[in-house]
Amino acid sequence: MRLPRIAGSSLAGSLFVLALVACGDKQGAGAMADSARRDSGSPTVPARQLGAMPMLPPFRAHLDSVAAKPAMIKSSMSGHMAEVHKVMEAMHADMMAAGMHSDAAYEALADSVVKASAALGRAKDKDLSRLVAMQVDQLRRLTAVYEQKAAAM
């Protein structure tokens, strides 16, 4: 059976177009709802990636090695300093990107790490073990505070 033509087109064609329009509205509404969910901060928005987090396990391994053999740092001082700087910059960037302002205690600890790095670079052999232990302790505390702050983000 053939459907009658309505104004130059078939009824089936008209129904098809009508169905497309109806489906298109639903998809558009769904897309608008998805957009609204993204804008409202619902779970459809992917969590912000923290740049420092993946750096921490290898950094801790580095600190463990340095703590176990402080003398090894003499031959790799520039690499150690670069790694400390890179991790500290990443932690700072994460906190700033999340809108978190560091507190006075965090800033004091970060400043002490920077000062310890400078002292370590000038250290005599007799002071090396003590300064390495001090800096490793400071860095472990600083990364622990960062992790606590990151968990609260």
Image: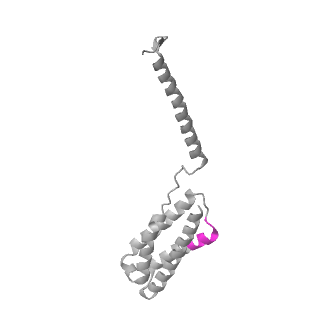
Which quadrant, please, contains the C terminus?
bottom right
Q: Quadrant of residue 141?
A: bottom right
Q: Is residue 105 magenta?
A: yes
* Residue at position x 49%, y 19% in the image: 14
For the record, the magenta segment spans 102-109
At which x and y percent is residue 103? Answer: 63, 67
Q: Can the viewer see residue 115 in this picture?
A: no
- Position of the N terminus by quadrant: top left
Report if residue 52 lies within the magenta region.
no
> Camera-side residue: 92 or 149?
149
- Residue at position x 55%, y 56% from top? 97
The residue lying furthest to the left in this view is: 75
State the residue at coordinates (48%, 78%): 136
Say which quarter of the image contains residue 152: bottom right
Query: Residue 65, image x and y in percent?
Result: 40, 79
Q: Is residue 93 above or below residue 104?
A: above
- Prevalent SS, magenta region: helix
Determine if residue 84 is in view. Answer: yes
